[in-house]
Image (cartoon, rainbow, N blue to C red):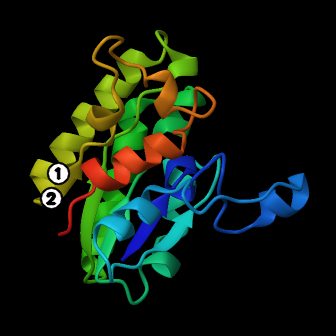
């Protein structure tokens, strides 16, 4: 399997699949800071190619599709929070995600699409854009007949909707190891 996306796919802030940030910033990476790690723990024998890159918008993620999807049977696409953070139009991010899905399907890869996670540091200003983008992601799932992984639903704090519980976020932007564990064990399901 392959996972293509932004910070959340990469495992930020504790893991960087390119290992560049760890070298530059001198920190020790934690492989448990990836939802892919926890999904593989839940399903022994499952392996992922982590194609996450910190800080990328959906248009930037799309440029890496062919390389990430090569030889993959299933591709999990996650992205859109960076678009929201940078004030890009939700409709543009949704178009980019739909185009990514269609291109991957044309490559013969089974595609799954993940919801955008809650963003504590952007709450409440960004909450309407995240809700709108997640609605669009579910529409893409229906239109393209693909499964949508409930990343937002699994990390949404029922006592503070639109935000992650403090234990589930490392920095208010990205999940903590406990948050990634929830994504890998509860949001991801074998295709």
191 displayed left or right of 36: left
Task: Report the label total.
Answer: 2
Q: Is residue 113 above or below residue 65?
A: above
Q: Is residue 45 above or below residue 144?
A: below
Q: Position of residue 189 (x, y in %)?
A: 21, 60
Alpha carbons under labels 1 and 2: distance apart: 5 Å
Q: Are marks 1 and 2 in contact (CB under 8 Å)?
A: yes
Dot 2, crowdedness within 10 Å: few (<14), some or many (≥20)? some
Residue at 45%, 40% (x, y): give it.
179
Q: Check residue 141 in the rendering and tell me which mark sits there, or answer none.
A: 1
Judging depth in this view, the residue of 106 and 11 nearest the camera is: 11
Judging depth in this view, the residue of 75 and 17 nearest the camera is: 17
Q: Position of residue 3 (x, y in %)?
A: 43, 66
Circle 2 is placed at which residue position? 144
Q: Is residue 148 above or below residue 50?
A: above
Secondary structure beneath dot 2 equals: helix
- Quadrant hosting residue 19: bottom right
Residue at 89%, 58% (x, y): give it.
24
Q: Position of residue 50 (x, y in %)?
A: 52, 69
Residue at 60%, 30% (x, y): give it.
86
Residue at 36%, 77% (x, y): give it.
1
Q: Position of residue 127 (x, y in %)?
A: 40, 17
Residue 79 appears anywhere in the view: no
- Quadrant hosting residue 163: top left
């Amino acid at each position: 399997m392959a996972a293509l996306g932004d910070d959340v796919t990469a495992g930020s802030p504790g893991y960087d699949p390119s290992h560049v940030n760890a070298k530059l910033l001198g920190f020790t990476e934690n492989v448990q800071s990836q939802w892919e790690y926890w999904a593989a723990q839940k399903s022994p024998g499952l392996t992922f190619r982590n194609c996450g890159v910190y800080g990328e918008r959906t248009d930037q993620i799309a440029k890496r599709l062919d390389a990430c999807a090569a030889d993959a049977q299933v591709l999990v696409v996650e992205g859109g929070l960076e678009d929201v953070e940078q004030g890009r139009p939700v409709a543009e991010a949704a178009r980019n995600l739909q185009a990514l899905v269609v291109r991957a399907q044309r490559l013969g890869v089974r595609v799954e699409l993940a919801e955008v996670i809650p963003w504590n540091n952007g709450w409440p200003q960004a909450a309407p854009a995240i809700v709108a983008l997640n609605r669009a992601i579910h529409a893409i799932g229906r239109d393209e007949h693909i499964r949508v992984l409930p990343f937002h639903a699994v990390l949404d704090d029922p006592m503070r909707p639109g935000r992650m519980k403090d234990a589930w976020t490392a920095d208010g932007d990205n999940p903590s190891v406990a948050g990634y564990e929830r994504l890998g064990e509860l949001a991801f399901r074998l295709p």
